[in-house]
Image (cartoon, rainbow, N blue to C red):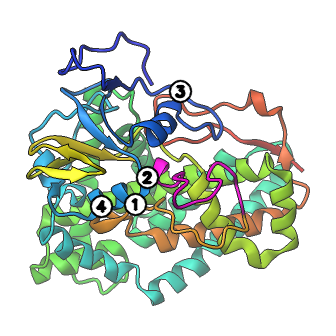
Amino acid sequence: MTTTTPPTPEHADDPHTHFWAVPELTGLTFDPLLARLLHEEPVARVRLPHGEGHAWLVTRYEDVKFVSADPRFSRRAVHGRSVTRLAPHFVPMEGAVGFADPPDHTRMRRVLARAFGTRALHVLREHAQDVMDGLLDRLARHGPPADLVEGVHRPFPLAVVGALMGVPEGDRPLVAHWSDALLAAGTGREAAEHARRETTRYFTELIGRSHGTGKETLAAVLADAVDEGTVDAHEAVGLAVLVQIGGTHAVRNNSANMVYALLTHPGHLARLRAEPGLLPRAVDELLRYIPHRNAVGLSRIALEDVEVGGVTIAKDDPVYVSYLTANRDPAVFPDPDKLDFDRGYNPHVAFGHGPHGCPGSALARVESEILLDSLWTRFPDLRLAVPENELRWQRGALLRGPETLPVTW
């Protein structure tokens, strides 16, 4: 992510503080420092390219789950702290659910649950299939070669989350542009602040227009929750932004990584096409296997001294967990670096764990299943249009994925 000279760590005289430069990785290459720490130093001190001081990095599966769920590790306490991080700028939104602790966090998440119920998911599945069919129709008319990122992976989740949210079709590209700016590690402060302001303004207005409409969009659900006094206006906007960004970027990158993985694992692809019933298990294994982000997500602060994996994390110390390494922990996943569709027990944490686990995980699975099933049903001879080493991967991004995915059929 950066090639600048590493800053001097707060514990400069401590050889056990690792400066984590976070390399620009391509394909499904796993971060070498993450792999090393998982096996050699599962609770380690690290310093990332930006922010101040050091943070603890927890990598083993059980330890990751422990920190993610234990209330002694607070997201709210991150406010006002310049914790060491990957991105040069840190611009949390007021009322952001990602920086709330229970009981406030629990109260806000209950509102989201209304929009992700069984009936809503059924309606969204039908809409998602219609969207995918339309995109593949357009791809067929375009003819080979074609870029799947541009033609499928970008517009598909944008349309699905737009329908869920109630964002008009004409507004979706602009909202996606702001989301891109917020999730790019190389975005300058001015651009990031502008994107945050515009995103806040947009969803404030969208929710404001949705009061009393009786619609089943998330914007309407949030407007009703504000009217009921369950959440305030800032919290409602924070929830909307969480779903909008996660629902577009995470699915875009994960689905593109899944397709890339299958295109470069022909044996797995052939088996999946021969055994359609394997699809849900294959999606879960792909979610476990794919290194879907660079570095780590949001930190937490220890509210008191807590022992994790035999190491005492002191009160006020920042802590990161790595869901990527948790998904490669050999104590839980035998032969973890192997993509294995026969993995019967797969309790992966690709969607996180604990109170801050992804609220849209069920919808993300549905989208992934629809995409993988529809793509090869429609284009059974789909294959890469360029040599694998010529693919371009996103640079300066917090989430990992191909920049383009040229295919032919």
Question: Nearer the observer, disc 4 or disc 3?
Answer: 4
> In the rendered structure, which amino acid carries the disc numbered 1?
Gly
Question: Nearer the observer, disc 2 or disc 3?
Answer: 2
- Distance of mark 2 from mark 1, alpha carbons? 7 Å
- Distance of mark 4 from mark 1, alpha carbons? 12 Å
- State the mark number for residue 352: 1
> In the rendered structure, which amino acid carries the disc numbered 4?
Phe
Which quarter of the figure is the N terminus placed in?
Answer: top left
Query: Is 344 displayed left or right of 168 in the figure?
Result: right
> Is residue 91 depicted above or below 304 in this figure?
above
Residue 63 lies in quadrant: bottom left
- State the mark number for residue 57: none
Q: Would you name the residue on which mark 2 appears?
A: 323
Query: Is 197 displayed left or right of 244 in the figure?
Result: left
> In the rendered structure, which amino acid carries the disc numbered 2?
Tyr
- State the mark number for residue 24: 3
Task: Tell me where the magenta segment starts and ends, as one range.
Answer: 324-340
Badges 2 and 1: C-beta atoms under 8 Å apart?
A: yes
Q: Position of residue 293 (x, y in %)?
A: 48, 43
Q: Residues within 10 Å of mark 2 (few under 14, many from 20)?
A: many
Q: Would you name the residue on which mark 4 appears?
A: 66
